Image: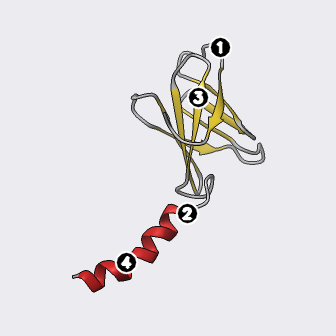
Amino acid sequence: MRKALLAAMPLLVLAACQTVGGPGGSSYFDCRDGRMLKVTYMRNGAMMQVGNDRAVMLDAVPGVGSTYERNGYRLQVAGDTATWNGLTRETPHVCSRVAVPR
């Protein structure tokens, strides 16, 4: 058992070093309204979660850089800034990237 655990350790270390922003990697943003935004990047889109709300899967918009949409939701990530709208098309929420979630 101990040998198996020791053999698995390098894989766990590599998984922890996964590039943020790559498929399966997550980025965290602190929004001006005090909520935390988590964006998990997928091959063809992104999963967006605001605070403790249910996560929403968004599709990548072809040819528009880091822009994702689905069912009235829109997320745009540019550098260290994320801007998103919800179903009610309220004023866009602006969020700044943080190194680790609070």
Give percent across and percent down for residue 16. Answer: 49, 62
Asked whether, in this view, residue 77 is left or right of residue 43, the answer is right
Q: CA distance from mark 3 to mark 1?
A: 17 Å
Query: Which residue does the numbered mark 3 point to in the structure image?
Result: 30
Q: Residues within 10 Å of mark 3 (few under 14, many from 20)?
A: many
Q: Residue at x 75, y 41 (%)?
A: 79
Q: CA distance from mark 4 to mark 2?
A: 15 Å
Asked whether, in this view, residue 94 is left or right of residue 17, the answer is right
Give percent across and percent down for residue 99. Answer: 60, 42
Which mark, residue 26? none
Query: Which residue does the numbered mark 1 point to in the structure image?
Result: 91
Query: Which residue does the numbered mark 2 point to in the structure image?
Result: 17
Instruction: Tell me the kind of residue under disc 2.
Output: Cys
Q: Element at badge 4?
A: helix
Give percent across and percent down for residue 21. Answer: 63, 52
Q: CA distance from mark 2 to mark 3?
A: 22 Å
Sequence order check, earlier mark of 4 and 2: 4
Sequence order check, earlier mark of 3 and 1: 3
The answer to whether marks 3 and 4 mark residues whose Cβ atoms lie closer than 8 Å is no
Q: CA distance from mark 3 to mark 4?
A: 34 Å
Mark 2 or 1, closer to the camera:
2
Compared to residue 11, the image places residue 45 above or below, namely above
